[in-house]
Image: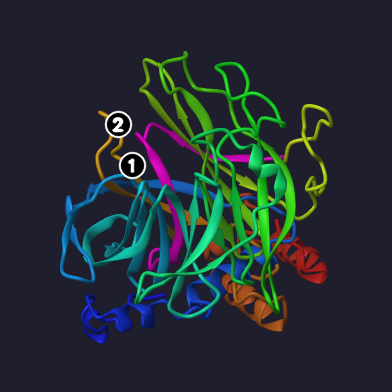
Amino acid sequence: MPAQPRDSFMHPRDGHAQAARFNTATPMSAMIVAALLASAACAQSPTIEFRGSVALPQQATDQHGQAFTVTGLSGITHIDGDRYAMVMDNSSKVIFLDVDLAANGAIISAAYVGALSLAETRDFEGIALSDLPGRIFLAEEGVPSVLEFDLVTGARTRSLPTPAPFSTRRANFGFESLTRDEQGTLWTANEEALTADGPLSTASTGTFVRLLRYDPSPTGYEAGAQHAYQTQPMHGALVSGARSGVADLVALPGGTLLVLERSFAFSAQGFFRTRIFHVDPRPLPDVSLNAGFLANPAAPAPKHPLWSGDLANLEGLSLGPRLAGGGYALLGVTDDGDPITTNRLVSFVLTPPRCIADFNEDGGVDGADVEAFFEAWENGGTAADVNDDGGVDGSDVEYFFERWSDGGCG
């Protein structure tokens, strides 16, 4: 989806203009990626490639014209076009920025275009668009809770119910993540295990957390299913503040999730290790009635590793628009709350799994895919080498129709 022209927006300090940018209709980019991911019925995982990072400014200005220092960036969400919003932890600040991306997903520029001071200060860690126009949801780690705020006044407008098991969260290990899919479903998770679910992570064993779903209803949101998830062990030896927990979630259209894990430990490769996994929560058992995994063990969700690297304290991640060069933008932010990390915007490219039956990638399997395949096949293009044997011949036709006939992927 191409970025909207900058001159189509009102001045960023106009609160009503900012609220208008948060129209909660599903962005076209989400519809497109939904079709591609949903059509991949064989549950293949997407791929992720790192595209680099850029430093972010140290100062922003809120709706009252008051400048403040940007620190502790912990969550990011895509609004539309080139506009994103970030939240700072232990603060009352939400920051808006425009990001110009190259066709390959590399960041050309990133600039703050306004900020919002909320009516209350909390340890906000995750951010997502609300289902209501002009509002956002924020996950805060302390209670923990998910709260909704108005983008004009900064006032809290809604508080979602926190299921009872999360009252046993450990200090500084509550809701670290938040995401919303195109159906309106919200997802969050505790960073590390509840006291009833097991110990914190170690250098040899990961920690058990709960992926929590909030389902939209006629009266608002209701707490839905919970699923057991186990993080990786720390990537090194114990050090003060060491941990390995869930830092953020990204809902992918089609029903699956990206899970961002952050490990902090002593290692020759660096103090931080970023890991991104792909998880399909749909077939997982609901553990919401399980009072504690210590007494009633739960099987952890199967997960597929997509990326691992040293990106300092990467805490937030958000799916962005489709890129001209293929794939989809995936942007993250780093938290400068330690002596190592600085405020940075990080870029990846997420490429959905290929569905051969949906050859023209329009989200459906029909005669148009046959026409598109034969056009590529007659031209001898590499796209028609669907069986990946290095040649374009009759075996590709057979392979294509095997999948087209049952609407499968591969």
Give the position of the N terminus as an image quadrant.
Answer: bottom left
**What element does badge 2 sit on?**
loop
Quadrant position of residue 119:
bottom left
Image disc number at residue 277: none
Cβ–Cβ below 8 Å for labels 2 and 1? yes
Front residue (pair 363, 80): 80
**What element does badge 1 sit on?**
loop
Q: Residues within 10 Å of mark 1 (few under 14, many from 20)?
A: many
Amino acid type, callout 2: Asp
Relative side of 77 to 360, left or right: left
Residue 193: tell me if it is visible.
Answer: yes
Find residue 91 and report its horizontal and vertical position in percent.
Answer: 33, 51
Find residue 89 and report its horizontal and vertical position in percent.
Answer: 37, 47
Q: Residues within 10 Å of mark 2 (few under 14, many from 20)?
A: few
Q: Is residue 108 above or below residue 206?
A: below
Q: Is residue 121 above or below residue 267?
A: below
For the record, the magenta segment spans 302-328
Amino acid type, callout 1: Asp
349 inside magenta stretch: no
327 inside magenta stretch: yes
Q: Can you identify the residue that label 2 sits on?
A: 338
Q: Can you identify the residue that label 1 sits on?
A: 335
Between the C-alphas of marks 2 and 1, the distance is: 8 Å
The residue drawn where x is 26% and y is 86% is: 8
The residue drawn where x is 49% and y is 36% is: 172
Find residue 88 and report its horizontal and vertical position in percent.
Answer: 34, 51
State the colouring used for the structure image.
rainbow
The residue drawn where x is 71% and y is 47% is: 164
